[in-house]
């Protein structure tokens, strides 16, 4: 998918507005740095567009440093609405006998060119605001847990971040997933 110039301009305006409105998320990073980092990175812009189109509200949550690398993350208040009601991965989706969803968290993330947040990244995000007060989000699950048929998800309740487990085949209307993109 190649972005049209108007799509690119609209996306950059949306990202800049969100960036400037939420400076606490990326202290020490300027919008000029973000623009420079995104320049000529069509794949990254396509990923950010997919994050935005599915309700993720991507924003810079880490960056700068020596490498200049930026990390964008879904900062929507609740798990992105366009990514809910999905199993954890393709294996779990295919294994469902009934009510098989069209996709899974890992499949959708891969199609967007992004990755699920790790538990550490999820906790770091929660230090920047309060997310998933009514929903929950699948997170990257260690192979040992996944090998036993499970998957991990997180939410924020009672002022705390909780990590839970569920069968990877499960899915709920209030559970989606958050992703990150390194640029």
Image (cartoon, grey):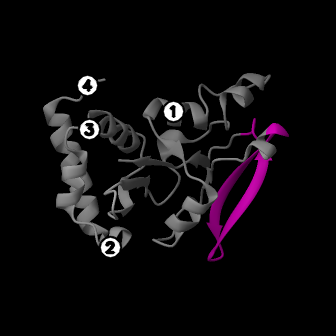
Q: How far apart in space, not on screen, are marks 1 and 2 (Cα)?
A: 29 Å
- Whether residue 69 sits left or right of residue 139 in the image: it is left
**Dot 3: what SS?**
loop
Q: Which residue is mark 2?
A: 27
Q: How far apart in space, not on screen, are marks 3 and 1 (Cα)?
A: 17 Å
Q: In the rendered image of this protein, does residue 7 appear above or below residue 30?
A: above
Residue contact between numbered discs 1 and 2, judged by CB atoms under 8 Å: no
- Residue 41, numbered circle: 3
Q: Magenta region, mostly helix, strand or loop? A: strand
The magenta segment is: 147-170
* 131 and 47: which is toward the camera: 47
Q: Residue at x 14, y 33 (%)?
A: 5
Q: Categorize mark 1 by other alpha carbons within 10 Å: few (<14), some (14-19), many (20+).
A: some
Q: How far apart in space, not on screen, are marks 2 and 3 (Cα)?
A: 23 Å
Q: How far apart in space, not on screen, are marks 4 and 1 (Cα)?
A: 17 Å
Q: Earlier in the sequence, mark 4 or mark 1?
A: 4
**Dot 1: what SS?**
helix
């Amino acid at each position: 998918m190649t972005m049209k110039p108007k799509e690119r301009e609209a996306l950059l305006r949306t990202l800049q507005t969100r960036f400037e409105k939420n400076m606490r998320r990326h202290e020490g990073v300027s919008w000029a740095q973000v623009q420079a980092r995104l320049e000529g990175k069509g794949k990254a812009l396509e990923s950010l567009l997919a994050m935005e189109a599915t309700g993720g509200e991507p924003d810079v949550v880490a960056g700068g440093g020596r490498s200049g690398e930026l990390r964008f993350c879904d900062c929507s208040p609740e798990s992105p609405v366009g990514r809910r009601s999905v199993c954890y991965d393709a294996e779990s989706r295919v294994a469902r006998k009934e009510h098989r969803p069209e996709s899974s968290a890992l499949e959708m993330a891969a199609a967007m060119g992004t990755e699920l947040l790790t538990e550490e990244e999820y906790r770091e995000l929660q230090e920047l605001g309060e997310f998933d007060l009514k929903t929950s989000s699948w997170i990257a699950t260690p192979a040992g847990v996944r090998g036993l048929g499970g998957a991990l998800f997180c939410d924020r309740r009672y002022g705390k971040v909780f990590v839970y487990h569920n069968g990877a085949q499960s899915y709920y209307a209030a559970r989606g997933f958050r992703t990150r993109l390194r640029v």
